[in-house]
Image (cartoon, helix red, strand yellow):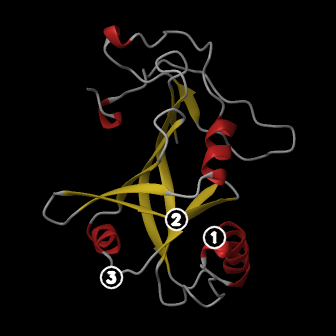
Amino acid sequence: MVEPDDLEVPEHSSQQDSPDADSARAFPHRGRPDMPADYGVPGDSQGLLSWNFVEERMTRAINYWFGTTRPDGRPHAMPGWGVWLDGVFYFDGSPQTRRGRNLVANPSVVVHLESGSEVVILEGEAYEIVGPGSELAGKLVQAIEAKYGAMGYHPTLDLWDRGGLYQLQLRKAFAWTKFPEDATRWIF
């Protein structure tokens, strides 16, 4: 089986998402993952998923799977909570957890959703934000409370003053709903 780390987008690919009229942010480069021919991934851009597909699922999801690497090179996977806020994925947790200690040693992380049918996989680096500032902290508290408050999680504005908040710096993403027809990869 080919893993997402093994997938490449041809350098000559030029498909792009089109920004919405009211969105001024830059969109990532969109194309097909490069897979062995017998996987049947189309060579054209017809059927590519939009970046909105990823954002909608990241916003809606409750649980996310995090893949990190232990300092000795062994993999570590653990589910956790997070929020997609203003085009950025944030998550929190004690820096003393295995995930937190792994990220100190190696910030590379893979985040994916639980579904194997509506697949979203994000790859990048997670950076700890110590003392996020009142505006960001307020937005995060509101988003987390709305999403997880009924499950008993009620963060406060000062929760991350000494660490434990992470922001994902995206490098690439993959998504599909009907593999291989709509298999899509984004590069940031």
Q: Are marks 2 and 3 in contact (CB under 8 Å)?
A: no
- Disc 3: which residue: 96
Is residue 172 shown left or right of residue 131? left
Crowd band around label 3 with a 10 angstrom C-alpha radius: few (<14), some (14–19), many (20+): few
Crowd band around label 1 with a 10 angstrom C-alpha radius: few (<14), some (14–19), many (20+): some
Classify mark 1: helix, strand or loop: helix
Classify mark 2: helix, strand or loop: loop
Q: Quadrant of residue 98?
A: bottom left
- The image shows residue 26 at horizontal and vertical percentages of 68, 43
Tag shown at residue 81 = 2
Residue nearest the viewer, comparing 178 with 105:
178
In the rendered structure, which amino acid carries the disc numbered 1? Tyr
- Disc 1: which residue: 148
- The image shows residue 32 at horizontal and vertical percentages of 49, 21
Residue shown at the point (53%, 21%) measured from the top left: 178
> Which residue sits furthest right?
22
Residue shown at the point (32%, 82%) measured from the top left: 96
